[in-house]
Image: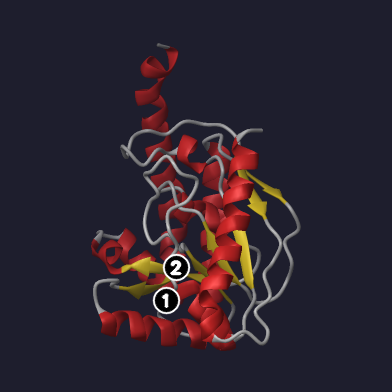
């Protein structure tokens, strides 16, 4: 009963504070985006990290890191159960990175422009788009920084800890010879439930860093084994931390 009464007021607070935090950084993002350089993208990443970190703290969902965040270039993979995953990743990941994102999001007014600056776009229905995005991610890993990929592809709306993984993140890791860094968001679905845009609720917001997975010497024939290793590690961790 208490939650039903408070929910509309809290949701309004969340939306208003998001608009204020996002729009405070937006002019700087637009200015730096004109540079179209690695340095400009790194500045945009830092501005985004600060704005989202501040917003999560203001609304009572501060990110708590558990595990050691190592320096270096990684392919980050994470479970995906909430819209807020796309926001948590910024304060969660130390250093410059870009994420793989769906082309649909770029159509959103104002936000779409920002979205194009921080992600590498892909249309999963297009073989050509998938091929181009793979090349862009490989180039980013070699020239700029880390990548973040949700290997489930979309929200996990099942009762299982994880959906089946796509091959893309693991194919990229092997071809680029870049280690995989699994992370999990055990609380995200309780902070902003996927069933409705307005279902926000404050509380703990843990980001768990798991053991990195090296790929040195692996070939494309090792994708199934690598994928199973990552899946098992993340599934076991989700079961463990959601029970705590």
Q: The C terminus is located in which quarter?
A: top right
Provide the secondary structure element on which disc 1 rests: helix
Q: Position of residue 125 (x, y in %)?
A: 24, 72
Q: What label does residue 132 carry, if any?
A: none
> Disc 1 marks which residue?
33
Provide the secondary structure element on which disc 2 rests: helix
Q: Position of residue 72 (x, y in %)?
A: 70, 75
Seen at 35% across and 85% down, the residue is 131
Q: The N terminus is located in which quarter?
A: top left
Pointers 1 and 2 in contact (C-beta within 8 Å): yes
Q: Position of residue 139 (x, y in %)?
A: 50, 88
Which image quadrant is residue 136 in? bottom left
Q: Can residue 11 be seen in this view?
A: yes
Q: What label does residue 29 carry, if any?
A: 2
Seen at 55% across and 64% down, the residue is 228
Q: Is 211 on the left-hand or right-hand side of 30?
A: right
In the figure, 202 relative to 141: above or below?
Answer: above
Q: Is 106 on the left-hand or right-hand side of 45?
A: left
Disc 1 and disc 2: Cα gap in Å?
6 Å
Is disc 1 surrounded by few (<14), some (14 to 19) or many (20+) residues within 10 Å? Answer: some
Which image quadrant is residue 97 in? bottom right
């Amino acid at each position: 009963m208490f939650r039903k009464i408070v929910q509309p007021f809290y949701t309004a607070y969340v939306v208003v504070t998001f608009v204020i935090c996002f729009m405070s950084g937006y002019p700087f993002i637009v200015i730096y985006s004109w540079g179209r350089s690695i340095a400009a993208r790194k500045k945009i990443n830092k501005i985004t990290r600060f704005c989202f970190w501040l917003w999560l703290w203001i609304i009572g969902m501060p990110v708590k890191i558990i595990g050691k965040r190592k320096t270096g270039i990684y392919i980050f993979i994470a479970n995906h159960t909430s819209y807020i995953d796309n926001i948590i990743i910024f304060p969660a990941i130390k250093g410059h990175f870009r994420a793989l994102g769906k082309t649909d999001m770029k159509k959103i007014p104002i936000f779409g422009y920002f979205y194009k600056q921080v992600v590498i776009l892909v249309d999963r229905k297009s073989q050509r788009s998938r091929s181009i995005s793979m090349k862009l991610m490989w180039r980013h890993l070699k020239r700029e920084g880390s990548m973040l990929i949700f290997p489930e592809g979309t929200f996990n709306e099942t009762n299982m800890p994880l959906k089946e993984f796509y091959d893309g993140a693991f194919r990229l890791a092997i071809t680029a010879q870049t280690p995989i860094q699994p992370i999990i968001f055990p609380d995200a679905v309780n902070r902003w439930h996927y069933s409705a845009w307005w279902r926000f609720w404050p509380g703990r917001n843990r980001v768990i860093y798991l053991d990195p997975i090296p790929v040195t010497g692996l070939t494309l024939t090792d994708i199934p084994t690598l994928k199973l290793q990552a899946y098992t590690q993340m599934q076991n961790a989700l079961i463990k931390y959601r029970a705590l």
